Amino acid sequence: NRVSYADIEGTDYIIRLSHVNGVAQMVGRGSVATFGEWLLESHRSGEPIVVNDVSTDPRFTESERANFRASEIAAFAMVMLVKNGQWVAAFGVHNATPRAWKKTEVELIRDVAERIWEAVERARSERARR
């Protein structure tokens, strides 16, 4: 239902555009702390994070679940992009209902996240050269 790419700046994320189908847009700046404690601990690995059902996943606190419900996220797969040891971006695919993510879908999400990051970096470099 939603696909979002966020730049990470310090303790904030910035979503400039998200693509949606049947749910509200998610754009703007917010605290990465809203991702949930275990997600913040997991980001260092750069491995995809997959949640099939936020409401039953034991890794979330009740307040974290409430944040996801408020954002119409019942399931998600995301990649936290780590470059040179620094967390630089996050790419997520959100579903408004629980879903079992397939391995091929998660691989595609990881590939798309890397391609978007490369395109963003290329655009920043070109802008700086001008």
Image (tube, rainbow, N blue to C red):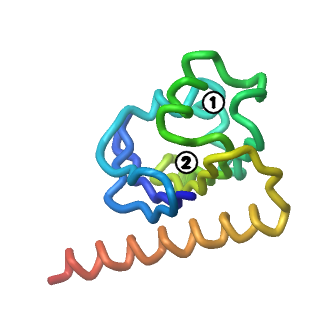
Q: Residue at x 38, y 32 (%)?
A: 31
- Type of residue at label 1? Glu
Q: In the image, what residue occupies the spot 75% across and 38% down?
A: 53
Residue ranking furthest to the top:
62
| Disc 1 secondary structure class | helix
Identity of the residue furthest to the left in this view: 130
At x 42% / y 61%, what residue is drawn? 18
Q: Is residue 26 above or below residue 42?
A: below
Crowd class of label 2 (few under 14; some 14 to 19; many from 20; radius 10 Å): few
Q: Is residue 128 left or right of residue 103?
A: left
Q: Residues within 10 Å of mark 1 (few under 14, many from 20)?
A: few
Amino acid residing under circle 2: Gly
Give percent across and percent down for residue 51.
73, 42
Q: Nearer the viewer, mark 1 or mark 2?
A: 1
Q: Quadrant of the N terminus?
A: bottom right
Q: Earlier in the sequence, mark 1 or mark 2?
A: 1
Q: Quadrant of the C terminus?
A: bottom left
Q: Toward the viewer: 43 or 77?
A: 77
The residue identified by callout 1 is 41
- Do the residues bearing badges 1 and 2 touch, measured as CB atoms within 8 Å? no
- Residue pointed to by mark 2: 85
State left or right for residue 90 relative to residue 42.
Answer: left
Q: Secondary structure at mark 2?
A: loop
Where residue 67 sits: x, y (%)?
50, 28
| Nearest to the observer: residue 65 or residue 112 | 65
Q: Position of residue 68 (x, y in %)?
A: 55, 33
Q: Quadrant of residue 43?
A: top right
Residue closest to the eye, 102 or 129: 102
